[in-house]
Amino acid sequence: LVEDEIIARTGATRHAVRAALQALVRDGLVVHLPNRGAQVRSFSPAEVEEITEVREMLHAEAARRIPMPPPADLLATLAAIEAAHAAAVDRGDLSAIHTENDRFHETLFAACANRYLASAIRDHARLSLAFRCHAMADPALARQARDEHRAMLDALRSGDREGFVRLCIGHTSFAKRAYGRVLGIAAAAE
């Protein structure tokens, strides 16, 4: 990530570009390498597997703690966010897909009534963003995520705890598969 190229492309000030890169470093999306500058972080297959495994465990525990039946206001809020996410998927608006996806999951998992568990889920979502973004950018996978959000809501509404837990665990795997395809494409091109 070359500062001068970003400045030329975006018209941003050097200060703004540096601040943005520092924020991306804090979020774990960019790394500074000696004598090479800032680069988008990549993950090894083992790292993706380990991060996904932890996310699945966190999601499963949170899903087990969310009250069933959930409060009506929680369902209404989740349904509104799901509708905004679905509309973003239909438009192909990557920024809105990301924003609404994060809002859906943060709202859902905050309902587990354990702020430390919810915080750990947010931290691991941020850690995994560098490979989750590949799934969000793939229209077929974005539609799959939309459909899985709807299925989670249906399971919540019907009180299907085990189905809900399975959906929350399985929902994390599509990002791992998308990044695996990227790694496979990159390996084939080398």
Image (tube, rainbow, N blue to C red):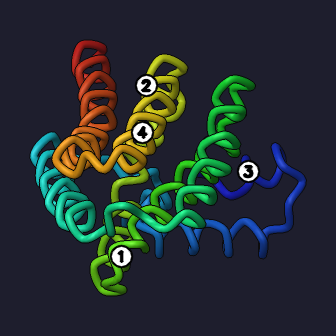
Mark linked to residue 144: 2
Say which residue label 4 marks.
154
Above or below, 93 relative to 164: above
Q: Earlier in the sequence, mark 3 or mark 1?
A: 3
Q: Secondary structure at mark 3?
A: helix
Q: Earlier in the sequence, mark 2 or mark 4?
A: 2
The residue positioned 30% from the left and 17% from the top of the image is 185
The residue carrying pointer 3 sits among few (fewer than 14), some (14 to 19) or many (20 or more) residues within 10 Å by Cα, namely some
For label 3, the residue is: 6
Q: Are marks 1 and 2 in contact (CB under 8 Å)?
A: no
* Residue at disc 4, secondary structure: helix
Q: Residue 186 is drawn in which quadrant? A: top left
Q: Is residue 32 visible?
A: no
The quarter of the image holding the C terminus is top left
Measure the C-alpha gap from mark 4 to mark 3.
44 Å
For disc 2, the neighbor class at 10 Å (few under 14, some 14 to 19, many from 20) is some
Residue at 60% across, 66% down: 73
Q: CA distance from mark 2 to mark 3?
A: 33 Å
**Residue 57 higher or lower than 186, as above or below:** below
